[in-house]
Image: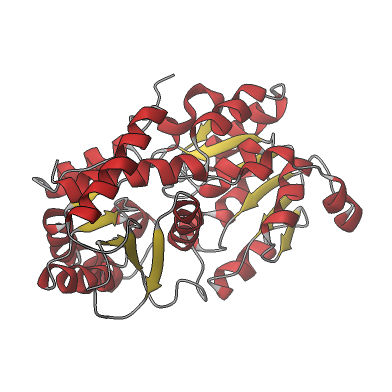
């Protein structure tokens, strides 16, 4: 299996730490602690999504490496900071405004792109012409972000190739994979099974919304005798109602904190993300580390992360989704997937790669 290009030895991380200290001290500042400002959309906590988690976890683990990280959702004075780190180019307007401010104040900018082209999803799911036009129109701002940033931090090689293909030439990049908390590797099903009396079911964790494609998953598993648990907040009430009405095999559970969510993964037989794209899907990483078999959409970067250790489906084809779930269900438990995730995709690794990217950003290399 091909590994992501983001893996680096410990020595490179240590060199990055040493160089950062030299750079900061060389500016005559009475400190050797790097200060970074994270900027993100204002509703990142009330409308939690993958960018929210990526930002919060990156902050947590960077601080363990000795980096001082603040978070802002508004324009602010950037003088105290060595660099600015922005998250998300799907809702790109806020990101562009933050980028423009940083450039005006002479600060280097790292951008976690978190990008995949939503054009297919919008076209194939009957989205309004206004939504399709708005997505395409926002490419003008995306191009400026991708070109004017100091460094781009895509989650995968394939994501970077897509950006370069659609918007190139763009800024230099350093691949920083998505991550997962290591405690998922110790997940046990008992707490979940005691509460819900469920085991060996099909699980899908994520926001209940058309892009996540839970309704097609529910339709694909109708008449299989399998129980489908959809676990997550309902971002689209009408769509959630359709999912709930898809059949008696569907059980819907609300958002859970990570300690309870780990037990749900451990109790499930297969975890499925059949969405229109994933990069690669934090829930797939969590489920795989918890020992669950993983089915993912074939749109996005999941194959780059999981290779032949997971199963893949086409989001627009219920028979493809059903076949992938049944193949996964009939396969033996795959402990190699768990080991692979634990070795390469922890938040500790994410923080280390991010710190190396900061060194590149500040040194101009």
Q: Nearer the viewer, residue 1 or 248?
A: 1
Left or right of residue 204, residue 252 in this image: right
Relative height, residue 333 to residue 256 (above, below): above
Relative height, residue 290 to residue 339 (above, below): below
Which residue, as the protein is rendered here, is positioned at the far top?
A: 1
Left or right of residue 240, residue 146 in this image: left
Percent across and percent down for residue 12 are: 33, 31
Q: Is residue 155 visible in this depiction of the protein?
A: no
Relative height, residue 201 to residue 306 (above, below): below
Q: Is residue 21 visible in this depiction of the protein?
A: yes
Res. 9 image quadrant: top left
Percent across and percent down for residue 93 are: 24, 72
Q: Quadrant of the N terminus?
A: top left
Q: Nearer the viewer, residue 347 or 49?
A: 347
Q: Nearer the viewer, residue 182 or 211?
A: 182
* Residue found at x 57% / y 36%: 295
Q: Quadrant of the C terminus?
A: top left
């Amino acid at each position: 299996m091909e590994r992501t290009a983001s893996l680096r030895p410990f020595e490179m991380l240590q060199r990055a730490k040493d160089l950062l200290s030299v750079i900061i001290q060389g500016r005559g500042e009475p400190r050797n602690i790097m200060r970074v400002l994270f900027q993100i959309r204002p509703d990142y906590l009330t409308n939690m999504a993958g960018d929210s988690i990526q930002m919060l976890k990156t902050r947590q683990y960077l601080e363990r490496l000795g980096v001082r990280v603040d978070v802002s959702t508004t324009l602010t004075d950037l003088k105290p900071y060595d660099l600015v780190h922005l998250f998300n180019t799907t809702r790109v307007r806020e990101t562009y405004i933050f980028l423009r401010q940083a450039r005006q104040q002479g600060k280097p900018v790292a951008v976690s792109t978190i990008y995949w082209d939503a054009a297919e999803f919008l076209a194939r799911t009957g989205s309004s012409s206004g939504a399709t036009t708005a997505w395409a129109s926002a490419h003008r701002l995306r191009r400026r972000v991708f070109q004017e940033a100091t460094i781009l931090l895509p989650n995968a090689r394939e994501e970077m190739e897509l950006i370069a293909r659609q918007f190139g030439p763009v800024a230099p990049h350093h691949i920083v994979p998505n991550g997962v908390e290591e405690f998922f590797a110790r997940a046990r099903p008992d707490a979940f099974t005691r509460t819900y009396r469920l085991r060996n079911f099909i699980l899908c964790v994520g926001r209940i919304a058309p892009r996540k494609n839970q309704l097609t998953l529910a339709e694909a598993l109708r008449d299989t005798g399998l129980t489908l648990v959809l676990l997550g907040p309902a971002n689209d009430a009408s769509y959630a109602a359709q999912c709930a009405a898809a059949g008696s095999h569907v059980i819907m559970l609300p958002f859970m904190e990570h300690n309870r969510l780990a037990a749900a993964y451990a109790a499930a037989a297969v975890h499925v993300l059949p969405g229109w794209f994933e990069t690669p899907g934090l829930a797939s990483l969590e489920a795989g580390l918890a020992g669950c078999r993983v089915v993912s959409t074939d749109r996005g970067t999941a194959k780059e992360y999981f290779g032949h250790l997971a199963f893949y489906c086409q989001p627009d084809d219920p028979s493809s989704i059903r076949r992938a779930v049944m193949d996964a269900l009939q396969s033996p438990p795959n402990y190699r997937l768990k080991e692979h995730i634990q070795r390469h995709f922890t938040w500790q690794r994410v923080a280390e790669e991010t710190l190396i990217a900061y060194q590149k950003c500040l040194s101009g290399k």
